Image (cartoon, rainbow, N blue to C red):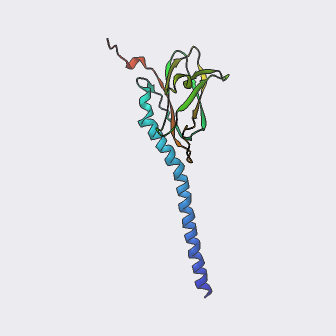
């Protein structure tokens, strides 16, 4: 009788351990799949916003909810023309982004430009800039907080790959 009881307990423990392992694997995969979906969104949707600029190869994308902010530090070099493209999933409210220098002086604010999704610029001196993004809050009343992928991509203008269209 005791042997049967021990076997039954071992079987229950094995099931619990199996369930625990399954839940653990599921929890590890879930954040990764969300990031993978955002990276795919950045590649398929946002990268087109850079044209005719050449993408720098870095996909900065994450899931944000309305009202949330994120910051990205990026080094830019003098004498180069750049385009920053910020885009979010279509179900999101407008994405507000600012580009700030090391002293947090605002160099560009897309809110003053009707929430433009791109900004083209060049710098006189190489420097690290801060790209601050915020998903605005929705004007509609809802019990649900909207969330979705938001991507920040950087491109540079490659004069060697252009041709005179005259």
Q: Is residue 84 above or below residue 37?
A: above
Q: For residue 15, which quarter of the picture?
A: bottom right
Give the farthest residue toward the right: 103
Q: Position of residue 35 (x, y in %)?
A: 51, 44
Name which residue lies at 43% across and 28% down. 49
Position of 151 with respect to 107 (left or right) is left
In the picture, the quarter occupied by the N terminus is: bottom right
Q: Position of residue 112 (x, y in %)?
A: 56, 22
Give the farthest residue toward the top: 166
How many numbered circles does the render carry? 0
Of residues 7 and 51, which is closer to you in this image?
A: 51
Give the farthest residue toward the left: 166
In the picture, the quarter occupied by the C terminus is: top left
Position of 96 with respect to 163 (left or right) is right
Name which residue lies at 49% across and 48% down. 33
Position of 136 with respect to 49 (left or right) is right
Q: Position of residue 52 (x, y in %)?
A: 40, 23
Q: Position of residue 117 (x, y in %)?
A: 49, 28
Position of 22 with respect to 158 (left or right) is right
Of residues 142 and 80, which is closer to you in this image?
A: 142
Q: For residue 110, which quarter of the picture?
A: top right
Name which residue lies at 58% across and 34% down. 134
């Amino acid at each position: 009788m005791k042997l049967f009881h021990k076997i039954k307990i071992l079987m229950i423990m094995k099931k619990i351990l199996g369930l625990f392992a399954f839940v653990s694997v599921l929890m590890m995969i879930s954040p990764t799949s969300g990031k993978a979906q955002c990276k795919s969104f950045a590649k398929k949707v946002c990268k087109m916003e850079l044209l005719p600029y050449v993408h720098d190869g870095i996909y900065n994308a994450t899931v944000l909810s309305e009202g949330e902010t994120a910051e990205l530090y990026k080094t830019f070099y003098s004498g180069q023309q750049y385009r920053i493209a910020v885009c979010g999933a279509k179900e999101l409210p407008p994405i507000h982004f600012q580009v700030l220098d090391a002293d947090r002086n605002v160099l560009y604010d897309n809110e003053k430009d009707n929430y433009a999704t791109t900004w083209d610029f060049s710098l006189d001196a190489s420097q690290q800039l801060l790209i601050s993004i915020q998903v605005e809050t929705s004007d509609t009343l809802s019990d649900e907080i909207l969330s979705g992928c938001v991507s920040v991509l950087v491109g540079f203008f490659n004069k060697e790959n252009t041709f005179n269209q005259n």
